Image (cartoon, coloured by chain):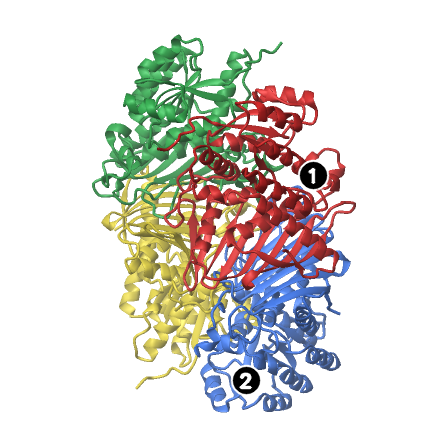
Chain colours: A blue, B yellow, C green, D red
Amino acid sequence: MTKKLGRKLRLGMVGGGPGAFIGGVHRIAARFDGKFDLVAAALSSNAEKSTSYAAELGIPRSYGSYAEMAEAEAKREDGIDVVAIVTPNDTHYAIAKAFLAAGIHVMCDKPMTTTLEDAVKLADDVERSGLIFGLTHTYSGYPVVRQMRSIVESGLLGKLRMINVEYVQGWLATPLETTGANKQAEWRTDPKRSGPAGCLGDIATHAYHLAYFVSGLDAEFLSCDLSTFVEGRRLDDNVQAMIRYEGGAKASLWSSQIAIGNENNLNLRLYGEKGSLEWNQENPNYARYTPLGEATQILSRGGGQLNAAAARLPAGHPEGYFEAFAQLYDDLAEQITARLEEREPSVTAKLLPTCQDGVKGLRFIEAALASSSKQSAWTPLK
Amino acid sequence: MTKKLGRKLRLGMVGGGPGAFIGGVHRIAARFDGKFDLVAAALSSNAEKSTSYAAELGIPRSYGSYAEMAEAEAKREDGIDVVAIVTPNDTHYAIAKAFLAAGIHVMCDKPMTTTLEDAVKLADDVERSGLIFGLTHTYSGYPVVRQMRSIVESGLLGKLRMINVEYVQGWLATPLETTGANKQAEWRTDPKRSGPAGCLGDIATHAYHLAYFVSGLDAEFLSCDLSTFVEGRRLDDNVQAMIRYEGGAKASLWSSQIAIGNENNLNLRLYGEKGSLEWNQENPNYARYTPLGEATQILSRGGGQLNAAAARLPAGHPEGYFEAFAQLYDDLAEQITARLEEREPSVTAKLLPTCQDGVKGLRFIEAALASSSKQSAWTPLK
Amino acid sequence: MTKKLGRKLRLGMVGGGPGAFIGGVHRIAARFDGKFDLVAAALSSNAEKSTSYAAELGIPRSYGSYAEMAEAEAKREDGIDVVAIVTPNDTHYAIAKAFLAAGIHVMCDKPMTTTLEDAVKLADDVERSGLIFGLTHTYSGYPVVRQMRSIVESGLLGKLRMINVEYVQGWLATPLETTGANKQAEWRTDPKRSGPAGCLGDIATHAYHLAYFVSGLDAEFLSCDLSTFVEGRRLDDNVQAMIRYEGGAKASLWSSQIAIGNENNLNLRLYGEKGSLEWNQENPNYARYTPLGEATQILSRGGGQLNAAAARLPAGHPEGYFEAFAQLYDDLAEQITARLEEREPSVTAKLLPTCQDGVKGLRFIEAALASSSKQSAWTPLK
Amino acid sequence: MTKKLGRKLRLGMVGGGPGAFIGGVHRIAARFDGKFDLVAAALSSNAEKSTSYAAELGIPRSYGSYAEMAEAEAKREDGIDVVAIVTPNDTHYAIAKAFLAAGIHVMCDKPMTTTLEDAVKLADDVERSGLIFGLTHTYSGYPVVRQMRSIVESGLLGKLRMINVEYVQGWLATPLETTGANKQAEWRTDPKRSGPAGCLGDIATHAYHLAYFVSGLDAEFLSCDLSTFVEGRRLDDNVQAMIRYEGGAKASLWSSQIAIGNENNLNLRLYGEKGSLEWNQENPNYARYTPLGEATQILSRGGGQLNAAAARLPAGHPEGYFEAFAQLYDDLAEQITARLEEREPSVTAKLLPTCQDGVKGLRFIEAALASSSKQSAWTPLK
């Protein structure tokens, strides 16, 4: 006999105060499929701001600090099932630790931490807790990306040889962080809040994760050249890397925030012995698939060629970034619900990036920093 | 002193039972920006189905019929502010009439009715009621479409000369309605439920509305050739039309559901004396703008070139169909809230298509049917 | 025993003086594959100009008039095999007639004549003469266009239902012909030199021919609306038409010279019961092919999917307009050579447009003019 | 008083026998603009084959060896002005040396030689001879590529920061060279004929040259990882490199012949402080230009935005690979003609790649081989 939860999941949020970008995205994504109620929050380190913004957003319980929130929610019978952590990178670790200690599942923005050491410790905490920990590598939530993963897994491309992945933006081509008018630019180029990686931690990690997510390949070594092109900037704004995977495949990775004319150009190409796949985030509902010796095909979200599982709309009705993000929340909902209903979650729900992915991301960041500081020497990732 | 509503709006829904497509879209769209609670519904003509599906969706109040629902909700202090009508076309009129009579605002799927006569009557009802009536011509909710409208309005294209609008699909290239496996195909090709227009009413009206929405031009005459290419089909599946607007501009319109290889290809191009604009729904975050004698520009959602008002995400983060649909609900929310708060709604909110747009749509359908039956004679639309 | 010609063909040219556009294109195209020597010409109606320009181009024999040239070349043992007529439209008929009378094959620019009457007479002359007459509908020379023709012929699309063909330019969006600085604009908008059709004769005929060339369908009726959007212009600059083919297929045709932002946008889409094809002249080395129920394929010139017969380069090495034009000269060379060698020409060479295509083109022009003047009445083309 | 040559230039050819690809391309390119007569050749190392093929092609003088040809032509009053060398890479040096010694200008296919040593010696020979030496880096002949060079030179992009250049093909994804059916694959993967570089010498050099040609930047160091993905292949088939230019700009270069789905995908992107440019060889008539903070523009060949100097056709009429190749012959013709007419050649003609470009190419090849063999160590290029 199946147990039925029969209620929405209760979500809390730390961070995401007025003016924050990603907090609002998390809220829309969590609301998308109607499976969460946002019932508690510590939106800002300023208690007053937190309270008034929570009221404005219709969130019933507002706290002055995440510590207080973790403690109080853990005690309530109707306390939150899960917390979304959407604060700057340097605070993720402590916050996550607190909620895990309180027995509350966690959805954490990326990068997971600012050091590999913290990432490893956090992964240990998660394992010990037995709780669910999701990491919002958004781009793995696109239906077409997940189908590319299936195609690779099914062997249609044969053994992979070469990957080319790029995540290229242009919005930091000038010293925007010095204008006083762009908070996003400020914290992203501030080593105190972002850690030692700029473009590397902000977007190159997404590219690195995406290549891993779709190919299933673990990187063994990388050779990296970090640049800071904008004078006075304190962190890297351009990342070039060559990667060697276990089994012989290789990758070129380029990530930049000074490439004028690029908005959010995340582009993935995979080449195997029997075929290839190409995908671009700015036109995310399609992929190009070329079987060896045949014509290139345009795969469309939900078309006969791609299993439609994750798509909410018929092909030709574009889905976008929010839908990808909402997919991760949907995966989270399924994992938590399955646990509460004492059953196995769906296979798809397990695609939600985990703290192990977070550790891989930090390994990538640390290896890239190390390689770049040693004349791009090939540096191990394990 | 500004009055503040301080609560979410209460939404009801008629139609949208299990298996329906557009009902689910309305629910996601209404939830998107967190301004509505779906609190009452008559989801199906089958009362039992309605009740169990409402429970599944977490809708507190379920009714056996729309009439019962209109009556009961009107009496409650916490009755619905607005009802979404997402039933087949032939029932829109009666349902809308009932809710208007009960003093409840209406959000209606398109086409508004199946006859021009009903459309005109409904428009009269709306006017007499003084209530808000929104019509979900989804594509007018795309941020880039709205910016194209602004560009035209601002005079950047000069006097318009020629418009080319297409809405082309391929999913009805075979007699899908006879397979017993596709409800969408069945009611869309059934004159009883869809009225006398097939492709014409289903999608050509969207194309016609979009051209009007962006250009601001009223059509005076059209010459139309309707075809039914799939043998045995009872309604048209291909629409060719030439249109003459007031002031001398012209348009070519092509709409089809038998054009294999097209998913949901809604494409609009406008040519004026000083420039042109092009937009495609399958890549909706961009438009092409060519000023006379200059290079073509790629306008991007929210870029410096397009006022970012309606966009929820920075450029390069794709938005899609749901966001466009949610925009219409956002407009609706703003209009209702403004009224409850006794203030003027925002200018943008007034872009929500109205019952007058519904009347125009039916005029288009009737003129197209008339022209096609008279050897494509030029037929007036007023 | 096969006879071998063992020499290049001798080509003459009428028209193509200094400043002419299409004359130079014919010369490059004729030279492309090394099968012609340009040995005689009457390049201009001004004898002096003719002589000095012929010297500059290294053409050995220059004449003061086409009549003189036809007579003199006919008498020489080493006289020209074929003449290229590249003068304004109104002179094609008389010149062609003269060379046919002199027993010389003809390659004529399009449209063939300015009236249907002349076209029919010329076709009679050609038939009586038994000579080869080629018409340079350039776009039928593209390898991918010819492969689309094969695909249709092979039945891969099934019975055709709908065609959409556009030939859209923007260069005449202003009254360029009144500036005194653009000869091309002047003669193309001058009824005396171009006949009664502007955009219609200049480019819509290409679109019409292309649809016919690829589909193999004969048009039965058309309904047309011609416009002149630029004030003071003496000929149409925008053509909208609906076409009915024998067997039930239909087409929408749009051609314009006022569509700002379009350079030479010739676009053909064909939809049958089993599949579709799409091609665009500005990216001519690829076509899109969608078999019913399968993914869209990108067909590439010379790929395994398209017979490589006509391509001179491996796929990925773009060919363009000159190569397409050169293909027509290659076809002409093969036809003349085959006759001189007393053998059948290759099947491909017979794809060279003929005077019958010219007659069809004039029928289209006359029917479009007639329909447009009678409120777009459906007008027969036969 | 200007001297006028008044005759076509006399061209000879070494290599380009039956079945050769690039020989035929050189012949079409040389004929394109009507400035050369191909009058002498040693088409094959097999004298009989040479003679019969020369006869078939209508080349008056055929020689059994290049040495004989150089000697004989040097003695004739009407001897060749210039020789085209289109043999496999390992023979370029000796042949070029022989013709230079005979006082004959040279047009040489790339890569110039198989070793840097030979390249340097050849450059010395050229300098001593005072003769003209052109190297057919085809892609530098595209009009849009040349305009991109002008745009960079003019400072519109500001100081360059980052370049991304790719030259990616898929035709060698399988061991085609072992099938006995593909000569092109055989010599390209044979170290004896191609030298120590496979994909590196065949196409990566084109990419490297193109980046240099457009940016004007000299590379200082590179870090390279060469791969051979196809089992049994004797040369590299995949090239990844990071490049550092003088002045601080950097580049990522990827070249491959195993990337299924790519035909001849040469793609160049340049990012400066004030703007960016992007170009793709498979759609060569357009470039994307983004000025800092403005919309991306589509630059079109010959449009107002790009100086039309080199284009032979109005925009929208595609030009391709042959036209680019013909441009190099046009440059060569202008340089030789100017010398014979005792005047300065046009500025454009000097864009023809030289033996110095050939030396740079070999430096790139040798540095890449060295870096790859030393764990991708940064290796100087000077």
The extreme front residue here reads D128
Q: Label 1: which residue?
A: D90
The quadrant in which residue B284 appears is bottom left
Provide the chain ID for the residue under circle 1: D
Q: Is residue C154 above or below residue B363?
A: above
Q: Is residue C86 visible?
A: no
Residue B174, how many percent across, how many down?
A: 53, 42
The quadrant in which residue C108 appears is top left
Is C283 placed left or right of C191 in the picture? right
Provide the chain ID for the residue under circle 2: A
Q: Is residue C368 visible?
A: yes
- In front: D93, or A57? D93
The residue at the point 72 percent across, 52 percent down is: D227
Q: CA distance from mark 1 to mark 2?
A: 72 Å
Q: Is residue B260 above or below residue B311?
A: above
The extreme left residue here reads C232
Q: Is residue A72 above or below residue A217?
A: below
Residue D377, how many percent across, how many down?
A: 70, 61
- In front: B103, or A63? A63
Q: Are marks 1 and 2 on the same chain?
A: no
Q: Tag 2's secondary structure? A: strand
Residue D99, how many percent across, how many down?
A: 61, 32
Q: Label 2: which residue?
A: A41
On the rendered image, what quadrant is the C terminus of chain D found in? bottom right
The amino acid sitting under disc 2 is Ala
- Labels 1, 2: front one: 1
Q: Tag 1's secondary structure? A: helix
